Image: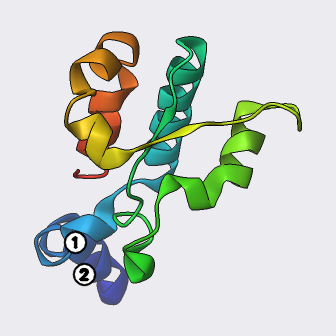
Amino acid sequence: MTALVASKQFGATEYKQLSPSATISHGKAWRAIVSLSQECLAANLPVPNVPMGALTQEFYDWDLKLFEPLLRYSLHLAPEQKIEFEAWQKVRGTELKKYEAVAPSLTRVISLLKL
């Protein structure tokens, strides 16, 4: 019983300081990414190719484009529908204002993935 209580206490207090990136909710992050993608597709903008390193810790250089099949499934896209991706550096740079105007979920994705 003591081990269970201690483990819960450690997870609620110390673990957040030791490994903050391990406390990201994958479900919340993925829902925000799907919302961002829906907003971009509705506005005829390419989807930002966000870095997924915060979620794929061992594979820090992976980006959203590698998860395209899962994204297509989550968006319920037909096989003939294409997803265009925009480089993350460009979105964070010159295109940021344009994306913020049409995709309010971008702010949430940036926050959740600590970008």
Helix, strand or loop at mark 1: helix
Instruction: Report the residue at 51% width, 34% height from top.
Output: 47
Q: CA distance from mark 2 to mark 1?
A: 5 Å
Instruction: Report the residue at 22% width, 64% height from top.
Output: 12
Where is residue 8 shown, x and y percent of the image?
Answer: 30, 72
Residue 54 sits above or below residue 92 on the image: below
Instruction: Report the residue at 45% width, 71% height from top.
Output: 56
Relative side of 34 to 11, left or right: right
Crowding around mark 2 (Cα neighbors within 10 Å: few <14, some 14 to 19, many 20+) is few
Residue 40 sits above or below residue 1 on the image: above
Where is residue 46 shown, x and y percent of the image?
Answer: 52, 30
Q: Residue furthest right?
A: 79
Helix, strand or loop at mark 2: helix
Relative side of 93 to 77, left or right: left
Residue 106 sits above or below residue 100 on the image: below
Figure quadrant of residue 20: bottom left
Give me the disc on residue 86: none
Position of the N terminus, as image quadrant, is bottom left
Q: How many marks?
A: 2
Q: Nearer the viewer, residue 85 or 103?
A: 85
Q: Mark 1 is on which residue type?
A: Gln
Figure quadrant of residue 104: top left
Where is residue 113 shown, x and y percent of the image?
Answer: 31, 51
Q: Tell me, what colour scheme is on the image?
A: rainbow
Mark 1 lies on residue: 9
- Callout 2–callout 1 Cβ contact below 8 Å: yes
Q: Mark 2 is on which residue type?
A: Ala
Crowding around mark 1 (Cα neighbors within 10 Å: few <14, some 14 to 19, many 20+) is few
Where is residue 77 shown, x and y percent of the image?
Answer: 80, 31
Mark 2 lies on residue: 6
Q: Nearer the viewer, residue 25 or 67?
A: 67
